[in-house]
Image (cartoon, rainbow, N blue to C red):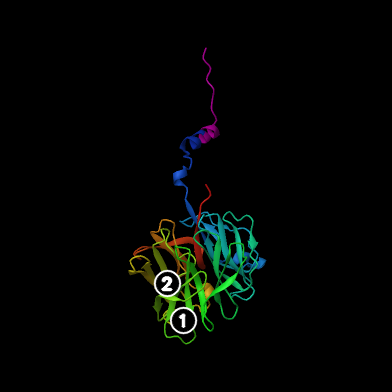
Amino acid sequence: MKRFHTVSPAALLLAGALLSFTPLRAADSPKWQIVCSRVNRSQAAAGLNIVLHVVNPDGSGDRLFPGQSAPVNVFPTCSPDGKRLAWTSAPSLGFAGSNISVANTDGSEPRSLPMTNCGMAAWSPDGKRLAYVSGAEQPAVWVAGADGTDARQVSPPAGVGGLFPFWLPDGKSIGYTRLKKDAERLEIVRVPAEGGEETVVTESDATPMAGANALSPDGKRLLYIIFKPTASKSAAAHVWGLEDKVESLAGEWEAGDTKNYFLWPTPAWTPDGKSFLAKMRTPTGVVLFKISDDGETKTPIKNTDFCFSATAIPAPQ
């Protein structure tokens, strides 16, 4: 005589759930993530006013980047090998008392480099050196080892400021925004990493900014933004071909009204070199957008409200 076993409704539901579950394949997982600095009201009580967050390219998976202790954390940038993150840590929006923090991209082993009143770090192509800005009153561009040793000023000359440094692909030259009081036009210039004469890359009647994440992944294009912080509040992205010397417009938008360069819209390429990240003002506030390199497509990234600067890092595999 055959015996039949009854199955409970709960067991049937569980079996159905297991059958309908499709495990996440490696191909479905994001290959890169975004580290962005943004206002974090939930951490204000702990004294963290602008902090680094990590999100997936679509804004999902939002989490706080570990190892931050300063009230202001901005200008994140990833090393060429994808293993380390450098950013500016400061007590307020300025270089007074600021320093450069470095950690592994998973947030482990955070540490502060020995330089003071500095920030806007940019990794050299081989990851062995950092270009950065130092000086609370008259910021200038310096170079040091990746551990902060052997620091020396490379430019600019007396009476001229320098901001938003970046490396050229040969690792022998550094570019930056040259600031000079009462100048009719501002310039992005390049200078030998060992020091020497400046050469103008581009100039504008507003403020041209490149920064640590402005060199395309293939090393052939420089992305910079011309920003008018007080007049029209507009930002215009430009792409400059380093080999063919051809310049193209990659979009225009309103970036917000701020005179503090810690909050200016510095751009960052995505790993595929087909788009870049930059902040834009929307009716609800400032949000990080992914913008195609021709400027035609602008996609807001969720969980990036009040974001100011960003970089791409490899996703954990």
The type of residue carrying mark 1 is Thr
Q: Are marks 1 and 2 in contact (CB under 8 Å)?
A: no
Q: Which residues are magenta?
A: 1-14
Q: Quadrant of residue 170?
A: bottom left
Badge 1: few (under 14), some or many (20 or more) residues near its Cα, within 10 Å?
few
Q: Secondary structure at mark 1?
A: loop
Front in this rendered view, residue 232 or 70: 70
Front in this rendered view, residue 9 or 146: 146
Q: Is residue 52 left or right of residue 245?
A: right
The type of residue carrying mark 2 is Ile
Q: Quadrant of residue 247?
A: bottom left
Which residue carries the number 1 mark?
230
Q: Is residue 5 magenta?
A: yes
Which disc is residue 225 wearing?
2
x, y (%) of residue 146?
58, 62
Front in this rendered view, residue 308 or 110: 110
Q: Is residue 50 magenta?
A: no
Badge 2: few (under 14), some or many (20 or more) residues near its Cα, within 10 Å?
many
x, y (%) of residue 297?
36, 63
